[in-house]
Image: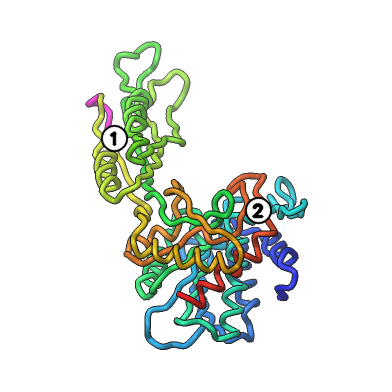
Amino acid sequence: MSTSDPVSALSVWLALESPTHHAPGVNGMMDLVAGEVAGLPIAVERIPGRDGLGDSLILRAGRATGEAGLAVMSHLDTVHPVGTSTRDLPVRVEGDRLYGPGVYDMKGGAYLALQAFKQVALAGTAKRPLVFLFTPDEEIGSPTTRGLIEEIGRKSAAVLVTEPAREGGKIVTARKGVGRFEVKLEGRPAHSGARHADGRSAIREAAHQILAIEGLTDYARGVTTTVALMGGGTAANVIPQHAWFSVDLRVATAADGAALEREILGLTPRDPDVRISVSGGMNRPPYEKSPEGAALFETAKRIAAGIGFDLQDCPMTGGGSDGNFTAALGVPTLDGLGIDGEGAHTLSEYALISSIAPRQALIKGLLETV
């Protein structure tokens, strides 16, 4: 596919909807990527998906010197259900904005990085072996690809992640760690009118536990705890026997992640007649800004200055990405290198067309320099 009209090419990507659990759509995206590099000096390895999820794709270019390579990582799954592009978020251009499901998070970044990768592969200008990993499941925590991400990360001198840019084009050099937990409670049912005293309410116990968990939020430490999903009960006239809720945990440091994980997994009931079971744990380790990561950012900043823009990074962001996994291994990682725009995971998601060329040039420069 020609790169002379990136908006048209990217619009094709957007029209092919690829929510995580729609494997045909995700695999269709992998087909598009593989088709883009057919006939180029780029080796393609396709890894079949599992657990009902889509495939992964690995592109390799440059000389196989045996030294540590430079890795690029993108995900091709989105959060928008099939039909979004024809109903609630049609693919369209309005001024400098390209709208469409997943354009900002993160098909735009994946597309422009692929163009940069192709340019460098054709020119043979990379200093290191290059690897580009496309994954199918980042939006649900990368359950089937974490091992592959970490395997490639360990073999890399640095990792570039094409998640979307932050406000004004800032890139990401630190992310909070993410924990996910499921809490289930079992009480004792009873008729709420005739035998109220015999019952032990799972929902009442859940209310106490939810308040305790939400109370663990500590903004000064960068710790947030959120209960965003819950349920329970049997009928309007029955003391509820069952209840459940989920917990989202974000932490700035590995130490806080370990401490909060122990605390949540160790929940004990206020009412001894109600049983609590907790599953889950830290899903993504914190991505803390390291001296090596800071040096990599300075390299990117110099490259951007040569292109003609002032590259900045943002404070530690609360969202996780696959960059959390590689950064936690001690591999210098730059994230947020993708397209600029706004509205990730919403029906107003858009990307700025004017950001495509400079962001693509930045990634090309990194592939040729690091």
Q: Main secondary structure of the magenta part?
A: loop
Sort mark 2 into few (<14), some (14-19) or many (20+) by Cα contacts within 10 Å: many
- Name the residue beneath numbered marker 2: 101
Q: Residue at x 41, y 52 (%)?
A: 175
Residue 244 at x, y percent in the picture? 39, 35
- Left or right: residue 99 versus residue 64 is right
Residue 162 at x, y percent in the picture? 53, 62
Q: Residue at x 32, y 40 (%)?
A: 221
- Span colored in magenta: 271-276
- Residue 272 colored in magenta in the image: yes
Check disc 2 and report its element: helix, strand or loop: loop
Question: Which quadrant would residue 215 be assigned to in this image?
Answer: top left
Q: Amino acid at mark 2?
A: Pro
- Left or right: residue 352 versus residue 228 is right
Question: Which quadrant would residue 185 be assigned to in this image?
Answer: top left
- Name the residue beneath numbered marker 1: 276
- Left or right: residue 17 versus residue 179 is right
Q: Is residue 238 above or below residue 298?
A: above
- Left or right: residue 194 versus residue 169 is left
